[in-house]
Image: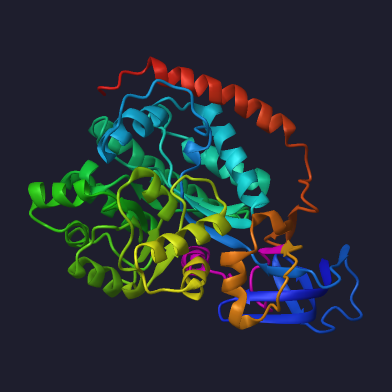
Amino acid sequence: MLIIKNATVVNFSPPEVHRGWDLVIDNGMIAAAGPGASEGLKADEVWDLNGDIVHPGLVCSHNHFYSGLSRGILADINPSPDFISILKNLWWRLDRAIDKDILKSSALICSLDAIRNGTTAVIDHHSSPSFIEGSLSVMKQSFEQTGLRGMSCYETSDRNGMSEMEAGVAENVRMAHEIDKEKEAGKWSGLYEAHIGGHAPFTIPESGMKMLKDAIDATGRGIHIHVAEDKYDAAHSHHHYDEDLLVRMDRHGLLNSKSLIAHGLYLSEKERNILDERNSFLVVNFRSNMNNNVGAQQHLGGIKNAALGTDGIGSDMWEEFKFAYFKHKDTGGPLWPGDFLNFLHNGNTLLERNFDSRFGRIEKGFKADLVVSDYRNPTPLKGENIAGHMAFGQSAGSVRSVVIDGKVVMKDRKFPFDEKEIYAEARENAARLWENMNKLDDSK
């Protein structure tokens, strides 16, 4: 049991601030929360925060941990004047250059960075065509080793042939069944779940769509896929199938309440309506879209279920929140920081739909995924202005300690293990990854 005393509790949705609360953390849950909630109780560990902030952990609703060793990349990348060139010359070469050891390093350092930034859950989307079978087990082990909560899937695609597509679907199904067996045996950690991955509709033929639907039916999971990240995806669908992207996916029965659609910059009104009717989620990734010069999301205010992701640009959701809001305002958008705080909070709904637990509030009966912050607010902090403090002040630099599933995974900015060796190994594997990329033929 962990007891946290004298905390300033901040909840994001609905936004509220409570001062002088105690929290009782037991068996992965918030067992009690409120003034004097810990009175008379004994715990293994007691933290007296003296008024410092405790808030729910942040959720990154779309990420790519396989890209974790691309930071500062030194590889021969041909000029890439458009989005498809960027995919072919950079990302599709990088993922083909990944092996088991490279993936392990990438997943571990991404997990540590997430925790350090106060991100307690990451929904990942994975690709490593030279290492498919077993790749999701490496992801799972990395999440569990660091204590991070999240999900992953394999990015099914035919871009290197149909045999690769079949292997990608098989890996998704294998991992889902592995988790189901762990649950049945009472051995599931509760930290890692599965879903069914697809790269993007323009790399998935009709037979591939059927494979994905069969995988969803066989596992009870939802699809996680890029859609309309660039105009090319929409144009390809109209050219080859004479259908909007989500109309095509819906025809195959791929959209439901567990579906996660990443990007969606070029969805028609009909597609947005389908997304809402199927109760599916749209996850937007502003920094990645800016980096790829593909445009900005213009329809956030009219989407029923929207959340924030990074698409591989780290797991700092404070920074993503700020970029999303400022880019939206820069394009003349009507939304305010409070709207983007709701989008950030909505990642918890994605977790609830997949983990069968309650997330995202400091309240009895919710999962104990929380962050202790030493943010010093220079102006009054109230429920009405939490989003303003996040947009114009608070950052990942204020994250001091992190608890996930009731376990302390970082305390006073230190992990319970020496991460230096992990980073040293990552640097070696990053150099080898870049060398591998230089050996690959760009034409494939």
- The outermost residue toward the top is 439
Residue at horizontal 78 percent and vertical 47 percent from the top: 414
In percent of width and height, residue 141 lies at: 60, 41
Q: Nearer the viewer, residue 62 or 212?
A: 62
Q: Start and end of the magenta stretch?
A: 346-371
Q: Nearer the viewer, residue 220 or 74?
A: 74
Q: Nearer the viewer, residue 57 or 140?
A: 57
In percent of width and height, residue 182 lies at: 56, 52
Q: Is residue 122 above or below residue 30?
A: above
Q: How many marks?
A: 0
Q: Is residue 40 magenta?
A: no
* Residue 433 in the figure: left or right of residue 173: right
Residue at horizontal 52 percent and vertical 69 percent from the top: 345
Q: Is residue 371 above or below residue 154?
A: below
* Residue 329 in the figure: left or right of residue 413: left
Image quadrant where one finds the N terminus: bottom right
Image quadrant where one finds the C terminus: top left
In percent of width and height, residue 387 lies at: 57, 72
Tell me the colour scheme of the image: rainbow
The picture quadrant where one finds residue 391 is bottom right
In percent of width and height, residue 207 lies at: 18, 45
Residue at horizontal 68 percent and vertical 27 percent from the top: 424
Residue 255 in sight here:
yes
Residue 184 in sight here:
no
Q: Is residue 275 above or below residue 18?
A: above
Residue at horizontal 43 percent and vertical 25 percent from the top: 97
Q: Is residue 373 above or below residue 97?
A: below
